[in-house]
Image: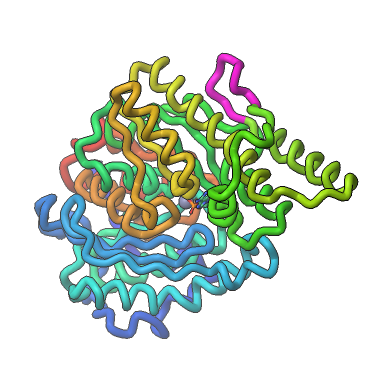
């Protein structure tokens, strides 16, 4: 089958944000004389491949330039916490608007810090899902504009695949099959990763995500937004054994999670404490609450490793920044004797370096997006394209028949 040929308007499928990426921004971008034809792109070696990564799926506007499989030339992040703080959570419409306002500056800074020219880029990797629809659209539209103007491939990256790539950024030799625990604001998912791009979902939360449990618990304790890091800090001066919160699903035999019960237990504990007129032992409460979440995560992750005979464990996503989780994981991994990868702090939470890293493999496999790439807020990781086969109802904007060798994801 002939390669799909990107053609036409690069902002098609995202018309409501068209004005955010047209001629008013990216003034320094050279406009390509001709529309992109994949077969006309000269092959580039893995080590020379230079990608711009873009991430706007939630409340961080991020851009990064990566060369080869892991030489990070720049990583710039603008966090919108100030915008959302007063609401105690991310407001999707405000997030999208702020991305529009900041994306140009963030990309320009990433290019400047990397000391590369637009013409040095071989492709643009952008998060196209899952995430907030309006927020994703900004990144996808900006990515299309840059790729179209430069005549270079566009790669739609699954946000979770980006988080997973951050484990290999930290530890490139991490063996597979690898058990991957993704713990973020919206996900608590266990995947068995047998080869690059092959993910089997083997457990997930049935209600709240771990990050959500942290954020909601922090809110109940009156902590600042974002709640997870604030609760982590407070817990460091508390005694994790002073107050015991339930460990839901710990003793059952499956690999699913449930965190809404912990949250309710905290609500009742605080209510009873307030009624009794005693002062809340805030640090002990935070430490006990955190311990319950973290213990469940650690136990389930290692149970999954045992059950699937995985050769390694990777823990990624915002909650993997949690100090207690990192300490307990490291302790257990040493005891069990299994390689463990947790990204360093700044790459646990959303960033564009991980998107460029995930885009690297997709680029080499020729899994390039067409100009019809859409933001897909519900994009499930298991439908990430494998073996070059068109994956879904929306085609996800990736080429059905890639123009470059398709050795990836076998
Ligand atoms: O991966 P991420 O940046 O965004 C999503 O993809 O959701 O994860 C954000 C989540 C938030 O719930 C935040 O509170 C949590 O990660 N988080 C933490 C810590 N740092 C971030 N939770 C616990 N302890 C932390 N240190
Ligand atoms: Zn994330």
**Residue at 59 percent of width and 33 percent of height:** 205
**Residue at 30% across / 25% down in the picture?**
338
Asked if residue 162 lies left or right of residue 202, the reply is left
Instruction: Give how far across and how far down residue 239 sits, in percent.
Output: 60, 41
- Would you say the magenta stretch is mainly helix, strand or loop? loop
Is 7 positioned to the left or the right of 236 in the image?
Answer: left
Q: Considering only vertical position in the picture, is 129 above or below 97?
A: above
Query: What span is colored magenta in the figure?
Result: 248-257
- Residue 132 position, x and y percent, is 56, 57
Tell me, yes or no, whether the highlighted magenta stretch contains residue 11: no
The one nearer the camera, 357 or 214, is 214
- Find residue 53 and report its image quarter: bottom left
Q: Residue sitting at 53 percent across and 22 percent down?
A: 255
Image height of 161 relative to 303, above or below: below
| Position of residue 177 measured from the top left corner of the image (x, y, whole percent) | 30, 25
* Residue 10 visible in the shown view: no
Residue at (24, 42) in percent of width and height: 171
| Residue 262 percent location from the top left of the image | 69, 36
Q: Is residue 234 visible?
A: yes
Q: Quadrant of the C terminus?
A: top left
Q: Nearer the viewer, residue 300 or 50?
A: 300
* Magenta stretch contains residue 253: yes
């Amino acid at each position: 089958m002939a390669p799909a040929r990107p053609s036409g308007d690069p902002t098609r499928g995202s018309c409501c944000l068209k004005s955010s990426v047209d001629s008013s921004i990216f003034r320094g971008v050279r406009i390509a004389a001709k529309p992109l034809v994949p077969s006309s792109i000269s092959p580039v070696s893995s080590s020379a491949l230079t990608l711009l990564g873009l991430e706007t799926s939630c409340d961080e506007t991020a851009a990064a330039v990566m060369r080869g499989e892991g030489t990070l030339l720049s990583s710039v992040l603008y966090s919108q916490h100030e915008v959302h703080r007063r609401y105690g959570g991310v407001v999707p419409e405000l997030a999208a608007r702020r991305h529009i306002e900041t994306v140009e500056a963030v990309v320009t800074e990433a290019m400047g810090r990397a000391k590369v020219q637009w013409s040095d880029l071989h492709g643009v990797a952008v998060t196209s899902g899952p995430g907030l629809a309006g927020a994703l659209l900004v990144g996808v539209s900006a990515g299309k504009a840059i790729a179209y103007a430069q005549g270079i491939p566009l790669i739609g990256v699954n946000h979770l695949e980006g988080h997973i790539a951050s484990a290999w950024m930290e530890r490139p030799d991490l063996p597979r099959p690898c058990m991957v625990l993704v713990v973020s604001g919206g996900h608590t998912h266990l995947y068995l990763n047998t080869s690059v791009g092959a993910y089997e979902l083997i457990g997930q939360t049935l209600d709240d995500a771990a990050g959500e449990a942290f954020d909601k618990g922090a809110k109940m304790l009156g902590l600042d937004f974002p709640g997870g890091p604030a609760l982590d800090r407070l817990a460091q001066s508390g005694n994790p054994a002073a107050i015991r919160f339930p460990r839901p699903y710990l003793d059952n035999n499956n690999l699913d999670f449930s965190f809404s019960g912990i949250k309710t237990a905290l609500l009742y504990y605080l209510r009873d404490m307030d009624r009794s007129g005693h002062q809340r032992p805030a640090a002990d409460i935070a430490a006990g609450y955190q311990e319950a979440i973290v213990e469940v995560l650690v136990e389930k992750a290692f149970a999954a490793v045992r059950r699937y005979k995985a050769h390694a464990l990777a823990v990624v996503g915002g909650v993997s920044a949690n100090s207690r989780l990192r300490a307990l994981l490291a302790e257990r991994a040493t005891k069990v004797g299994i390689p463990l990868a947790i990204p360093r702090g700044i790459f646990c939470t959303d960033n564009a370096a991980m998107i460029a890293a995930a885009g690297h493999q997709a680029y080499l496999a020729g899994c390039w997006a067409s100009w019809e790439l859409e933001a897909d807020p519900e994009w499930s990781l298991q439908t990430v394209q494998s073996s070059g086969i068109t994956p879904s109802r929306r085609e996800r904007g990736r080429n059905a028949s890639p123009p470059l060798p398709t050795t990836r994801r076998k």
